[in-house]
Amino acid sequence: MRTRSKLLLVTALLATALTACGNVPANGPASGPASGPASGPASGPATGGAADGSPKPGGTLVLGENGDEPACLDPHQLSTTNTTVVGRPIFDSLLWQDADGNLKPWLASAWKVSDDGLTYTFTLRQGVRFHDGSAWDAEALRLNLEHMRAPATKSPLAAAYIAPYEDAEVVDEHTLKVRLSSPYSAFLNVLAQSYLAMISPKQLKEDPASTCEHPVGSGPFVFDKWTKGQSIAYRKNPGYAWGPAGRGGPAYLDRLEIRFLAEDATRYNALLAGEVDVIDNTPPQNVEDIKANPDLAFDTIDRPGHPFSVWLNTGRAPFSDQRVRQALTLAVDREAIIGSVSFGQWNVATGFVTPSTPDHAESGGIAHDPAKAATLLDEAGWTAKGSDGIRVKDGRRLTAVALDTGVNPQNTQILVQTQAAAAKLGIELKIENVTAQVSSDRTAKGDFDVSVGIWTTNTADVLWIQYSSKNITTAERRGQNTTRLADDQLDELLERARQSTDAAERAAIYGQAQARLVGLAPAIPLYDRPSLVSSRTKVHGLTWDYAYGAVTFHDTWVS
């Protein structure tokens, strides 16, 4: 199943790049979203429904998630790895990326792009209502775009994604003309992501402060209750009639509950015991047992975007020195680490963009070479060693601080093994255990040396998000350039790529950017992280959000 899902998503996303990013307008049909079968995680045999095997409405589904619980449920403020899973039940997006990679209508029924790539005109779907009864119209879309970029929103992602957004003009009730300051090849792609989903215009105008705690969307489920540290509960939206992936009607489930189960063993055992119906972030060590269990089903899909990586803070010593960054990269045995941590479920990264992302390029030079690593540190002046083997220069030890939230046990294992590799090289890596909020705050301020993470997105523009000097956090704007890399040549390449309207030219530029990143070494790309989803065989109709590689529940039912 994994190979099939991976190949499908690669094909899908490459097709999306050609569809969404050229000069030719990407037009959807004038009526609702195009339909087609939604492919998703394997489910058990269709028993317990109607006699013909059709879905059985009703019931509650419980999903077990890891401990990466968001601090806020506003999609424009979300940035956790579970963002799409948590937010998609509540929120719809302007566009939908289907299994074949095509951008299809959702809350927009059609769109066209000007020849210069600066103006996008969206025709909006009629008849859509938010959970509070407010109407979906051109003004609602304009308000959402403004909310994404407003400094008060402090958006960690949506604001960066729509950075070229200039302004919008309401042409009529169901038509909005959006103007960009510069061409942006990924604009339509990112509008299909849950980070840019649509919030109730009434809530944005009357009570914007409530979007974190009591989100109001137009999705198939209505937010019900958030018991922090434990779960989020949703109930069916009975009036839902605008689903994007093959079926427009309301969800089959009456209720959906997401439980945050931080421990891998707890999550797995809850599935075995039937305490939860589905688990996301399946522990890699349990995958083969799940596949062999007749009561369970398993499927996976590779997430597009930036590989899971060890991020290095280039903004201060010791990793402000490129040679020190390159040395640590060469010292880390990526294949050994991933093999021991993932039990064969993850692929070692081949560069700074995953293969399932448009414009991925194979990046040579990320090798395991401890001898060369030691030579680089010698060249950087770290020639002396203390009694414990840690290198010393001008009386200072070669020390770095790594932040670990403990949310994901595999992340902790990776840091520990990186620490061991660094020690053999003569670098002292101190691991500090902090909360997710403290980690977020400290990385934004640059108060760290090493952290780990992944950035999932359906476009190679992730390189601009992660490495453009424009995305270093300032007092005015929260950026996502965690490594604080500032390289003029890379900046120029990334700006050219995101403005290019020619697919071949864009791919070539992104190839140059990926090659340069290997030399700059702001991060150590480790693996292309898949979504690992397991379920009881009574669960049917799980589907994927292909723009992120996350499981969704609009078509799910239980027997």
Image: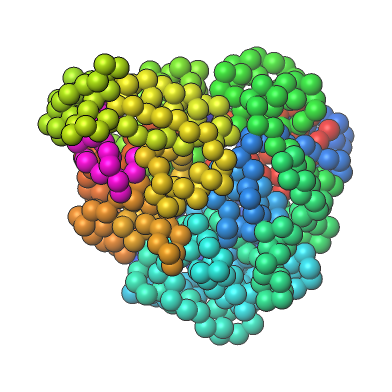
Q: How is the image coloured?
A: rainbow
When the figure is inspected, residue 128 is found, relative to residue 18, above or below; the finding is below
Quarter where residue 382 is shown:
top left
- Residue 247: image x %, image y %? 71, 52
Q: Quadrant of the N terminus?
A: top right
**Residue 33 % position (x, y):** 63, 60
Camera-side residue of 366 and 329:
329
Quarter location, residue 114: bottom left
> In the image, 210: left or right of 320?
right
Q: Which residue is at the far bottom? A: 171
Instruction: From this view, report whether residue 122 is shown above or below residue 362.
Output: below
Q: What residue lies at 23% left-to-right and 25% top-to-bottom?
A: 391
Name the residue furthest left. Answer: 379
Residue 499 rendering spot, x and y as whole percentages: 31, 64
For image coordinates 44% across by 23% down, the residue present is 416
Residue 236 included in the magenta stretch of the image:
no
Query: Quick check: can you spot residue 337?
Result: yes
| Region of the chain picked out in magenta, as a range | 312-333
Is 369 on the left or on the right of 254, as rendered? left
Tell me the residue at 65%/31% (across/down). Answer: 262
Q: Is residue 516 left or right of residue 308?
A: left
Which corner quadrant holds the C terminus? top right
- The residue positioned 59% from the left and 20% from the top of the image is 287
